[in-house]
Image (spheres, rainbow, N blue to C red):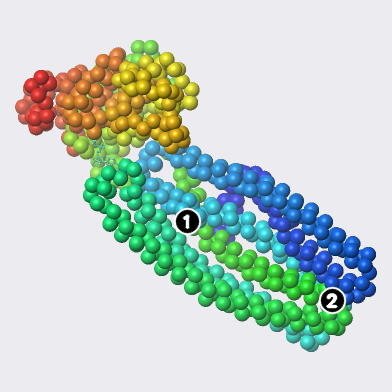
Amino acid sequence: MHSLKVNLRMLKILRSYSPGYYLLCAFTSLFGQLQFYYNLWISAEIVTELSNSRDVQKIWFLVAAALCVNLLLKLFSALLDYLSRKAHGLLLANEKAAFTKKLLSLDYAKLEDPEIRNLRRKVEENSYINNYGSNYFITHIRALMDILFNLAYSAFLFAEMISYAAKNGFDAAALLLGLSMCAAVAGRIILSNYGAKKTGEADKRLGDAMLEINRYSRGFPTSNSMGKDVRIYRLAPIVEELDRRAIDMQTKFFSEFWNTMFKYIDLPESGVNFLINTLSYLFTCYYCLAGVFPIGSVIKYVGYLNRFTGNAELLFENIFQLKYNTVFLEQYLEFFDIKNDMYQGSLSVEKRSDRKFDVEFKNVSFCYPGSDEFAIKNINFKFRVGEKLAVVGMNGSGKTTLIKLLCRLYDPTEGEIVMNDFNIRKYDYRQYLDLYSVVFQDYNLLAFSLGQNVAASPEFDKNRVKATLCDAGFGERLDTLPLGIETPLYKNFDADGVEISGGEAQKIALARALYRSSPFIILDEPTAALDPMAEAEIYSHFNDIVGGRTAIYISHRLSSCRFCDRILVLDRGEIVQYGTHEELLSDENGKYFELWNAQAQYYNEKNT
Ligand code: ADP
């Protein structure tokens, strides 16, 4: 019952992705399967006519009808097939798009939640690698329609056969044959049901093995970015070992699957089929000899009985498989059911021309989902509009976490962040996010045009994009690009795309932050890969460009941020110092003094 409910819910969801799909499939099955039964019926009619009155005109008529109806059915089926394939394409595309949309709309906190990450991995692997879940459901519902129409057509022929046989009555021999046939059909269904269960289990083991194999292959260091390490450290033997393991697993589980299939499906099926065929021939021949069935019935009834038993068996197999797939559908639906619980707020963020947004952290502590340690503890500080604030501290001291909280990617576990006297949770979430331009350490650029990357939008102001790129130090490189700001980045979609260096990517990411003229601008160590001197240069140059905006600079290198108005020093999630560079350095017992001296080796006289 529960399984039925889950499957029906899935059906409803998929119908909304491609409304006509299942109706088209039903018509495709209706006409597609009709052809087989029509051919059985018309062949039987022709044979009967040939063996009876041999009326040439009637025979020619039957032959012509057979040819014409076949032609029409074929053409009509081809049209329906084309339409249903098109609808199927739409269904798959919309299903995939719905998954992406769900991912994009998830609260960031949910996206990073270890449990949800695990669920997402399972859904992606099962659906898009192993083809369980939604894809499996789509394929099996389609097959179910063929099966049901086959059974429905068979039911007509069965009724016809019984009504013929009833005319003659059922003597002992006919009853015995009929009952044996029913017993054989029931036996085949029971056997195949058992076989389906056994092969289902083997299929699951094969599926799990394939998942692992795919995990190996996705982890294979064969990508371009890994190419250097592979060559320098001679990683090829490790890769080959992984390959060998994948091949061994594949061979083992495939042969187990096919053995099970042969033992529990193919072998018993062949035996019972043989029995059913024998009984069907005996039954129909018996009635033909008694003059009850026309001669052609041998073709018709033997053919239909075979088809009927095959489809009855498939029906059970299909239902079993749909039931087995329910667990994957549940995971899939569970993912779609994840509710965002980030409070969205309703207070409008004032569009202040003076950009006066004063922010204060009040006793803020935060613990990541799934972790029981505080990433930051009891954070209290205020910063004023237009200030240049530096957040410094060792790796892991909580700098990025502080920014994630400020930008409301997460809400604090304890305490509150206040902007212009209101808890930031109260502001309209979208409007609040618009206040910030952040360049994270792991920023991403997209394989779209340079202009679209800078503007983060399909449409953009060309002159402003160019000016911003020049401000970010990308001007010279821009002059070398034949398509200018229309140049696609990377070659994912376009062979004319340009590959850019790490430094150039940073400049584009900085330009993207500048282009969005939001009142707060934050650099969260996007330059961590550079040496300390280069980072310090970029930070101070960037500071010249941001003008009157409130800027926050994050680094674990103290020299990068010494130009800032105030510096906040974090250590193990807590604020240990807050003040100007000079104030902090004058405290010889402070963390800042300790770090500054520890890092002094990096800087020459001129820079200290
Ligand atoms: P920093 O930016 O100073 O290097 P972070 O703010 O990134 O430090 O990290 C602070 C602490 O929070 C670290 O102990 C880190 O391991 C932990 N942390 C960071 N991100 C996550 C996360 N998504 N889930 C769990 N713990 C995290």
Residue that mark 2 sits on: 295
Give the residue furthest to the bottom: 172
Which one is earlier in the sequence, the residue at label 1 or at label 2? 1
SS type, badge 2 = loop
**Disc 1 marks which amino acid?**
Asn
Residue 361 horizontal/vertical position (percent):
27, 27
Who is closer to the viewer here, 72 or 361?
Answer: 72
Measured in 3D between alpha carbons, the distance from the residue under mark 1 to the one under mark 2, in whole angstroms, is: 50 Å
Residue 590 visible:
no
Residue 478 horizontal/vertical position (percent):
36, 21
For the C terminus, the quadrant is top left
The residue that appears at 81% across and 74% down in the rendered structure is: 297
Which mark is nearer the camera, 1 or 2?
2
Residue 596, by quadrant, is: top left
For residue 371, above or below residue 398: below
For the N terminus, the quadrant is bottom right
Who is closer to the viewer here, 261 or 240?
Answer: 240
For residue 568, above or below residue 461: below
Residue that mark 1 sits on: 130
**Disc 2 marks which amino acid?**
Ile
Q: Could you classify mark 1 by the number of other residues whose Cα lies within 10 Å: few (under 14), some (14-19), or many (20 or more)? A: many
SS type, badge 1 = loop
Residue 324 horizontal/vertical position (percent):
52, 62
